[in-house]
Amino acid sequence: MAALKELLPPAKSTGKSHYDLSNDPWFKQRYSAAEAERSEVVKANPVPLYLKRESFRPSKPQDFGDGGAFPEIHYPQFPLDMGRKRDVNLGQKTLPVGVDKHWLSAAQPKNVPTQSSDSKFIKYKPSQQSAAFNSGECERIIRMVEMPVDPLEPPKFKYKRVPKASGSPPVLIMHSPPRPVTVKDQQDWEIPPCISNWKNPKGYTIPLDKRLAADGRGLQEVQINDNFAKLSEALYVAEQKAREAVEMRSKVQKERILKEKERKEQELRALAQKARSERTGAAPAAAVSMPSDRSIMDVDDMGGDYERKKERNAPRETKDEREERLKREGKDS
């Protein structure tokens, strides 16, 4: 057994059933360390009581002591700086102060070119060396100073965008040879303008043929119904019969008036004959039989029937003949 232990390497760690607090680094710093080491340990600040922490804002490691964050304080807390984001370049992102003590730095332009105030002296020798030129001076010294630049001056040059050049030539388009234009093609090209039947904002006078051409009614086939001809013929026959009836009634009325007039004349004649006979004392002449109204009406009816039969059997006159006859009757009356 001893020979086996000598052959095996020594154990790195030995298993223990309990934790030794004396070997803990935190315990050593606070209880078993020297005075110098204890002074370096972070000391905890006094923390208010539990119900008096409304205005307490722990921000330093001393505020937390040996514990963690306070859950009853609703404030971002980083005990032992755990969870705090450390930005290395924090100072580089800080913006510089943009104004001076007179608060004019921000209003001044930034892109003003720096102007050098240094002047240069140049020795100038003109090409004309005659005594009449420049009072006979052969040389002169010129002071060269840069002209100041106006910061509010508009730019002297304008940048124009040049269109991008095509990399390859365009693709050729093959066209068929031109063909002669026929009359039908020219007629097909004539498209009537769009003419509205409701709007005319310009107030143009548009002829009716142009309106009908734009309406497209000329493209429709017009079909007239046969009933139109039948209706016109029936109206013509009804008008002719109505005219004949009116003419017959007027004729019968005239005959009745004439017969009434003759009857009254016969009565007056008979009365005069009777008066003369009574005055002379002679026997009255035989009385003339006066037709009664009934007989007159019968005679009128017979005459009317005869006239109607005569007109019915007569040949039918045309429209022109009827108009001429009506004109003659109007002139006679």
Image (tube, helix red, strand yellow):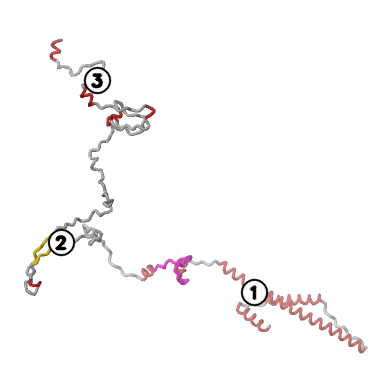
Residue that appears at 85% across and 81% down: 289
Relative horizontal placement of residue 278, taking residue 253 as reference (left or right): right
Q: Residue 240 got which mark?
A: 1
Q: Could you say which quadrant of the image residue 270 lies in?
A: bottom right
Question: Disc 2 residue type?
Answer: Val
Q: Quadrant of the C terminus?
A: bottom right
Q: Is residue 170 visible to us here? A: no
Establish if 247 lies above or below 147: below
Q: Residue 179, image x and y in percent?
A: 30, 68
Mark 1: which secondary structure?
A: helix
Q: Is residue 50 visible to us here? A: yes
Residue that appears at 66% across and 75% down: 243
- Per the image, the residue denoted by label 2 is 145
Q: Could you say which quadrant of the image residue 59 lies in?
A: top left
Establish if 247 lies above or below 108: below
Residue 205 magenta-highlighted = yes
Which mark is first along the chain, 3 or 1? 3
Range of residues picked out in magenta: 190-208
- Per the image, the residue denoted by label 3 is 31
Number of dots carrying numbers: 3
Disc 2 or disc 1, which is closer to the eye?
2
- Between 306 and 329, the one nearer to me in the picture: 329
Q: Residue 327, image x and y in percent?
A: 64, 81
Which mark is first along the chain, 2 or 3? 3
Mark 2–mark 1 distance (CA, rounded to whole Å): 121 Å
- Disc 3, disc 2: CB below 8 Å? no
Relative horizontal placement of residue 8, taking residue 269 as reference (left or right): left
Most prominent secondary structure in the magenta stretch? loop
